Structures are given as C-alpha cells and as structure tokens.
Image: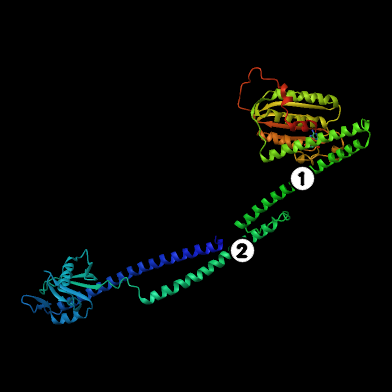
Amino acid sequence: MASVRTRLTAAYTAALAGTLVIFTFALLVARTEGNFAELQRSVADQASAAARAIKQSELSNQPVTVPGDKPGSRTVNPMLRIALEGVPSYLLVLDDTGKTLYASFAVRQLTDDDIATLVRTSLRLSATRPSVKVTLGEDQLLLVAREEPGDVQRGARPMRVVAGASTRRVGVIPPEQWTIMLGVAPLLIGVSVWFAWLIAGNALRPVDRVIDEVEAITDGRSLHRRLNVEDRGDELDRLAATLNEMIARLETSFSALRRFTADASHELKTPLTVMRADVERAMQVPSGSGDQLVALEEALAESARMADLVDSLLTLARADEGRFEVHREPVYLEPLVRDVAETAHILGESQGIDIALPVMEDALVMGDRARLRQLLLNLITNAIKYTAAGGSVEIALSRRIDGVSVSVRDTGIGISAADLPFVFERFWRADRARSRASERGGFGLGLAIAKWIAQAHGGTLSVTSRLGRGSTFTVLLPLAADVSRPDGEPALSDDGAARPAGERSIGIS
Ligand code: ADP
C-alpha cells in the first residue's frame, strides 16, 4: 500500500491534470466562438463595403447596371466592377429577380453546382436572417447579406449584396499555440507534483512525529510520558490530546494491575508462611500433644482464609471478564433482608451489638437472589466488624421514586473523608496493619464485590461516613415492573443451602 504522502500527491496530480484538460477545452471553445464572431464581423464589413460602393455608383449619376455579354443579361458597370474586385473572398450582387449582376473571383472559381447552391442560399437570406452557413464540397461558407434598396428616382432597382468567407480556419489552433500547450503543460504538472510532494511531506511530518513518540511511549516502560500538544488547535493537537488521554488510562490500568498482583501475592504470602510454620511445628512435636493441635488449628484457619481470598479473587476476575452470570428472577426484598438480619443478630449478639430494622417496605426487584444476599451480608458483616461493643446497626428497606434502597447504618469507627473515595477499591483497607493483625482482618475485597453486584443489577452502592461517628452504606436497585406477589412466597429458609462459594469469604471477612 502506497504511503499517504504518495497517495495525496497522486490525487493532487490527477486533479491538476483533469483541471488543465477541462481548462484547455474551455479555452478552445471560447477561442472558436471568438474567431467565429470575428469572421462574422469581417464578412459583414465586406458586404457593407460592397453595398457602399454600389450606393456611390448610384450617386455618380451613371447607370449602375449595363447589358452583359449574354443576350438579355445585365451586369454592374465597369467602374463599379473595379471597385467590387477590391473586396476579397466571396461576393455576389443579385438583382431583385435573383439574377446575378456580379460574382467575385473566388465565386467564379466554384463549380456551376456550387454557384447555383450559393445563389439559392443567398436568396433565402433576409433582414430577419442576415447570415447563414452553407456547405460547398468540403468547405463551409458563412454568408452575410445586405440589401441595397436602389434609388427609384434615378431608375436604380433594389439589389442584394452577399459576402461570404470560409469557416474552415475558425477552429484551428495555430501551431505555436500547440507548442506552448504541449510544452508548458507537462512542465506545469511536473512543478506542481513536486510542490504537492513537499507540501504533503510537510503536512504529514507531525503525524510521523506523533507515531515515533507513541512508539517510544508504548514500549511498556514509559507510560508516564505524554505526547507534545502544541496548542495550535488543529486535528493533530486533538489527536495528541486523545492519545494522551488513552495513555493516561492505560497507565492507570497498568498500575492498578501491578498493584492488584502485588496485593494478591502479599495476601497469599502471609497465610502460606503461617501454614508452613504450623506444619513444621506439628511435625516436630510428639503426636497428639496440645501444641500440635494448636498448630493444626492455625493451619486450618489460614487455609480457610486463603480459600476465601481465592474465592473472592475468582469472583472479581470472572466479573471483570464478564463471565459471571447474574440469574435474574423476581425477588421480594423484605424476606431477603429479614433473613440476612437473622444472621446479623447472631453475629451482633456475640459482639454486643444491637441490630434494628426500623423501616421495612417490601419491594420487588429482578435479580439474582444469591448475589443480592451476598451483597447485603457483606455490608452487614462490615457494619458489625467496624462497630465497637455497645453500638448499633440499623438496616432499612424503603421504596423510593427511583427504585428501592437498602441502607445499612452503623455507629462504628467510621471512615475518614480522605479514605472515603478508596473504600470500593480492591485490597483497600483503612488500616492495613491493624486490620491484618486484628481479628477483623479482611482482604479489602468485600466492598469491591458488593459494588460489582449492585452495578450488575443496574443499581448503585454509595457510602457516607464520618470518622468516629459511623457509616451508612446504601444500595439503590431498580424496581421490577409491578408483579403481584404470589401467595405463599417461600420463606428464604433454603438460602443457606443455595449459598454461593464466594459468600463465605465475605461473610467472615
Ligand atoms: P474488608 O474485608 O477489609 O472489610 P471491605 O472491602 O469490605 O474489606 O472493606 C474495605 C475497607 O473499608 C475495610 O478494611 C474498612 O477499612 C473499610 N470499611 C468497610 N466497611 C466499613 C464500615 N462499616 N465502617 C468503617 N469502615 C468500613
């Protein structure tokens, strides 16, 4: 494929050559028309000059016509004949009956047939049609007539003067013009092509520069660099700005990927180290000892944590790939929320936290029951985890114009304004060290999963919080089209059995 520069130059050359051909053609047409008008003028002048000579002859009191050579014929007087011979080209003087009184030398050279045609055509000319073209053999003549009314008092009769000239040379281009056209046109095209090549090269140079810069940036290590935007406001500036935005997004996703991998390996490293130490310890002590049991218990707990982590990672990875299916069915939220609240009561009781359900307005949504349960459980276990004993957690289910909202409000430790934008990020935890060491220790994936579930249902998950005062997480889901609730909607007692694998990790994270 030829380069853009070559294609631009070729297109320009074709356009220029086309324009030149059209221009030359238009010039030829204009020139032919001009030549024809010029010829018509000169023939008319000749006819007028002959008519003037006849008038002159009438005024000189001599008879304009005298008997001719043939019996009964008439011809113009000798003085007038001499004057008319001065008119070049074709000239005919006819009397009012159509008889020829004078024929110029050029007419006399024609064949009898051509002369007859000439006379016939001349007689067809009139005041309303003073000129006409006639073809004689291979030539074509333009004829122009003038009427000479004749002086009745002097006995002169009306006459018709017809002058003519060949139109053959009207459309002929002189050789010198051909030389100019054929010599100059290629030169003109050559120079223009050269200019077009230079201009196209110049115009495309910034594009080359952008390509080089992008190549240098996208080698993988220089994503922090940006293209030069020169503020000219042209297409190239827009291209550079768009590419810069794309590179910025690439940089963000690459660093997120790197962070994600680093975090995942870090999270997996600690339980593996603990497990290894525990197993080693268990192998060194005599069997059945209390130490061995402790080590094995710890190994079991760590392997459960790792399984949870791997489950959560898998859930998110599948969600990212779009491979996680959300099975939609009509779900009444009130029974679902009450069921989750049951679990919350059990968890809260052991932590000394009061669970309340102040508002419960049932609503129907189209969703995946298991996933919605997982979402609510994540929020509620977090609320219990991050609330000190004696605090309270409120779960409210209310219908709104724009959908149904489930909010989980706690009176716990809260989240600082600076941390708030990051809570839904993967592996993010407000205080990593403390979180990991304490029994609260989660992986920082629960909220990321919760947010994904809300979004997969066409809803949102938002948070408001004040450090030390508590937090409120609100899920907003679109309502299903009004479906009347069937009698005996099964209580969601079978939920435990239907629990997805990922749910466990969130429940205890
Ligand atoms: P984790 O498993 O660490 O709880 P999450 O994704 O569920 O992971 O939460 C991320 C972080 O957000 C938590 O580590 C915690 O710092 C903060 N957080 C979540 N819920 C609450 C809450 N109800 N109150 C205070 N902080 C919270």
Q: CA distance from mark 2 to mark 1?
A: 41 Å
Q: Nearer the viewer, residue 308 or 34?
A: 308
Q: Residue furthest left?
A: 71
Q: Position of residue 461 (x, y in %)?
A: 71, 34
Q: Nearer the viewer, residue 333 or 271?
A: 271
Residue sitting at x 82%, y 31%? 385
Quadrant containing the C terminus in the rendered view: top right
Q: Position of residue 88 (x, y in %)?
A: 23, 78
Which one is closest to the eye, mark 2 or mark 1? Answer: 1
Q: Position of residue 307 (x, y in %)?
A: 78, 35
Task: Classify 415 as above or below 228.
Answer: above
Q: Is residue 360 visible?
A: no
Q: Is residue 29 visible?
A: yes
Residue sitting at x 74%, y 23%? 339
Quadrant containing the N terminus in the rendered view: bottom right
Q: Nearer the viewer, residue 268 or 248?
A: 268
Question: Which label is found at residue 120?
Answer: none
**Residue at image mark 1:** 261
Kind of residue indicated by mark 2: Arg
Task: Classify 322 as above or below 203.
Answer: above
**Residue at image mark 2:** 205
Kind of residue indicated by mark 1: Thr
Q: Secondary structure at mark 1?
A: helix
Task: Classify 163 as above or below 218.
Answer: below
- Which quadrant holds residue 134? bottom left
Residue sitting at x 58%, y 65%? 201
Side (left or right) of 132 relative to 186: left
Task: Classify 12 as above or below 249.
Answer: below
Side (left or right) of 464 relative to 237: right
- Which quadrant holds residue 424? top right
Q: Secondary structure at mark 2?
A: helix
- Which quadrant holds residue 483? top right
